Image (tube, helix red, strand yellow):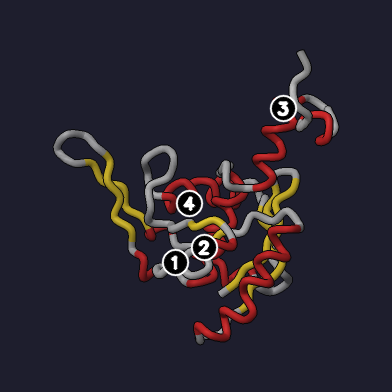
Amino acid sequence: MELLAGYKDGTLHVIDCKPLPQNLEALKKSLPKSMAKHKKKGFVVLVDEVIPVFAKYGRSCRLGQAGADGRPVLITALEAYRNMSRLQAISFPPGKSGFFDISESVVEEQRDAGGRVTYHIDWAELRPEATLLLMAVYGAVADSMLDTGTIKHLFNLIGGNKKESESTQPLKP
């Protein structure tokens, strides 16, 4: 499935969610072009796949992988999702919000004998639409140096308000 969403002023706007072809050759013909178009427009393109075919056109992100804080990306995304939901900071296409429901019981936090937190994740409880929503939430709240917007913002902070051509000229003695 493919989800298109935008994040502006603290609100995530889900625009569209649609199925993708279930054939690798058909995906190879259409998906790279679509991903490149969205990336060029400034979208963060996240790719969740087991066999890396399309990640080179975006940023590979698996909800089960460890994030920057060492916890599964799913946990970070779920915390942000719950916070955004409480604040009514997620909008859905008319009549589609039910497709994105996420059960409270999808994750069970447990502590081992040493006090370390472990997570039991019931992956079967996550519908594809909910998985995509969590990916969109994660993309909205977790900056990555692999995202164009983050890099541009960083360079603007480093270089002030200089034009790009001025900041790329060699240093003068």
Q: CA distance from mark 4 to mark 3?
A: 30 Å
Please name the residue that numbered disc 1 is placed on.
52
**The N terminus lies in which quarter of the figure?**
bottom right
N-term mark: 1 or 3: 1
Q: CA distance from mark 1 to mark 3?
A: 33 Å
Q: Pinpoint residue 28: horizontal percent, then vertical percent.
A: 57, 79
| Closer to viewer: mark 4 or mark 1 | 1
Question: Relative to the observer, which residue lies in front, 144 or 101?
Answer: 144
Please name the residue that numbered disc 4 is placed on.
78
Identify which amino acid the numbered label 1 is placed on.
Pro
Identify which amino acid the numbered label 3 is placed on.
Leu
Q: CA distance from mark 4 to mark 1?
A: 24 Å
Identify which amino acid the numbered label 2 is placed on.
Ala
Q: Residues within 10 Å of mark 3 (few under 14, many from 20)?
A: few
Residue 136 lies left or right of residue 154; in this view the side is left
Please name the residue that numbered disc 3 is placed on.
157
| Residue furthest top as drawn | 173
N-term mark: 2 or 3: 2
Q: CA distance from mark 2 to mark 1?
A: 6 Å
N-term mark: 2 or 4: 2
Q: Pinpoint residue 86: horizontal percent, then vertical percent.
A: 59, 48
- Give me the residue at 71% from left, 63% from top: 38
Residue 8 lies left or right of residue 50; in this view the side is right
Please name the residue that numbered disc 2 is placed on.
55
Secondary element at tag 3 = helix
Q: Residues within 10 Å of mark 1 (few under 14, many from 20)?
A: few
